[in-house]
Image (tube, rainbow, N blue to C red):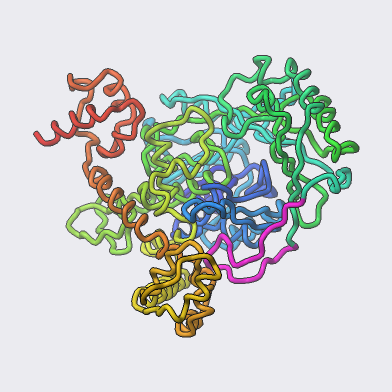
Amino acid sequence: MTFNYDVIVVGAGHAGCEAAAAAARLGSKTLLITMDMNKIAQMSCNPAVGGIAKGQIVREIDALGGQMGIVTDRTAIQFRMLNRSKGPAVWSPRAQSDRARFIETWRETLDSIPNLFIWQDTVTELVIKNNSLIEGVKTSLGAIFSAKSVVLTVGTFLNGLMHVGKTQIQGGRIAEPASFGITEQLRSLGFEVDRMKTGTPVRIDGRSVDFSLTGEQVGENDFHKFSYLDFTPRLLKQLSCWTLYTNEACHDVLRNGLNDSPLYNGQIKSIGPRYCPSIETKIVTFTDKLQHQLFLEPEGENTQEYYLNGFSSSLPLSIQLEALQQIPAFKNIHLYRPGYAIEYDFFPPTQLNHTLETKRIRNLFFAGQINGTTGYEEAAAQGLMAGINAHLKANTTTSDKVDSNFASLDGKTNTDTNSGSNSRSEFVLKRDEAYIGVLIDDLVTKGVDEPYRMFTSRAEYRILLRQDDADRRLTEKAYNLGLADAKRYALLKEKEDQIDSIVSFAKNYAVKPEQMNTFLESLGTTPLRHGIKLQDLILRPQLTIEKLAEFLPDFQAQLDKIPNRKAEIIEAAEILMKYEGYIAREKIVAEKINRLENVKIRGKFDYNTIQSLSTEAKQKLTKIDPETIAQASRIPGISPNDINVLLVLLGR
């Protein structure tokens, strides 16, 4: 056994698994340290992956060569595409997973990676040289492991404290101990530390539920999946979710118990998620609402355990139980465990670079809830990016030459061999390239005042960051990096060629009135007065490629040439044509902003000496130390006038 590694990843949640897998697959000898090898990639809250904006993130993780999409597809017990009533910019895939099989599949994935090793233990101290360079970790069992880079993905475990009414239990999640030592050490080195709060609902025995009093929510079984590599039918039995509602009797019980709520009696003082409130917060905030929707979500293919989405709570067990019994479907309810809240330490992410490396300690990276985020998907995305960058830092020296496969700061291939340094030392995605880019830039630039969750509204280039084109945006970058393999890259090129062939055919194929008018009139859309190109018909909202192909044999023959993933390719081509104008317009806006992304300012100013800047601007620019003018413009409190001052000074 060796105690020397290139990369060490602390914590085997969703961030840790992606970080370790990425670093090892890129070639770093990697050690993943976890408290419990039987709970790798544990779904601590709901057994689901994806959702609004989160589904796009999982697609991006997959496009970059990450594993979350593959694992989810293999363990899915329900799949749905959300937001179908809206435009494709906000379509979002979501899947229920079998919780136990999700863990098993992730463990199998990690065990199959040659450079990846696992150690079961708790890290209690970081080995840091001269208070500025990470060199390894120490554990509770007395082991000392050395590494060139370390990634901390410790989730809710740092000084974790759980609450069920007045009962308080130290722990990172139910039945698992908290972690102590790291917070105190990093605080002594000058890191800013704060506390956050999150929570989880009761788990219910399905045998005690009267499902006849609930509404069934079935899944979809079409071609959509998370991974672009998976063409197989769904492996597990597909199950329904169930909907129901709270009522006034339930609310009365909850209101009467507020004095015993840790959220309202002063017991919990940390920051909680505004967008995912507890049931007690809902009845206090939305006093006019007589009911709140709940979702019963199955935990697995062969278990009776259900997750009650929408009923997160830290109230005493007796109050949770009594409130639920007021709902007709839960009259005879049996719980596996109550809901609980948990408080934990996090480090405000403005202390990080865009690579997720800390500014204070070189080669130390943070990913996941330690950065103030919430959600498996946000954590996994950070883990993937931190794992990539930890590998790059561990394998980079200033004398290295630039490799044509290496990724530059903006994620693009850099073949400039005259730079004198290895530009593969960083891999960063921009805001117009990925939701992952938006996520990390928001964290590093704006910081957090509540647990950060991704929404489509956070991305200013939503039409460019669709779930259907994540592979077209990112897979070539991952291939150049070495994380996406040749098979994935070949599939991408095949898909691009097929999409281009459909678009080209539609732009050049002429349609005559006599071919289509009867059909068009039957759909209530305007008949043709003269011949037009097929693409102009596709632009009409009532028409789809597949409908038109039924009346145009030449077009059907073109579609029949598609060898693989036919439905996926047709959907992607149709979106490109229908939204061509919007896509082009958004690209122009993004290109203008990206000019400012190329204006580097880090290290060029002493902001406190610039008299023309406001006091707030001086303080925030000094604290964040933005890399570029564009990043500076996104810092809350930085005005357009402040940016103009910096641009004028740069011109001088």
Q: For the point 45% across and 23% down, which residue is it? A: 188
Indicate the position of residue 359 as horizontal and vertical percent values: 36, 34
Instruction: Work out which quarter of the rendered image holds the N terminus and state it.
Output: bottom right
Marker count (numbered) = 0
Q: Is residue 494 left or right of residue 227?
A: left
Residue 101 lies in quadrant: bottom right
Q: For the point 42% across and 69% down, which residue is it? A: 537
The correct choice, above or below, for 579 with respect to 19 in the image is: below
- Asked if residue 228 lies in the magenta stretch, the reply is yes
Q: Tell which of 181 and 410 is nearer to you.
A: 410
In this view of the protein, can residue 467 be seen by the observer? yes
Q: For the point 53% across and 41% down, which residue is it? A: 153
- Asked if residue 106 lies in the magenta stretch, the reply is no
Residue 256 lies in quadrant: top right
The residue range painted magenta reads 216-237
Indicate the position of residue 117 as horizontal and vertical percent values: 56, 54
Indicate the position of residue 113 as horizontal and vertical percent values: 55, 62
Indicate the position of residue 607 as horizontal and vertical percent values: 22, 25
Residue placed furthest toward the right:
332
Instruction: Work out which quarter of the rendered image holds the C terminus and state it.
Output: top left
Majority SS type along the magenta span: loop
Q: Tell which of 338 and 554 is nearer to you.
A: 554
Q: For the point 51% across and 24% down, which residue is it? A: 194
The correct choice, above or below, for 208 with respect to 491 in the image is: above
The correct choice, above or below, for 147 with respect to 611 in the image is: below
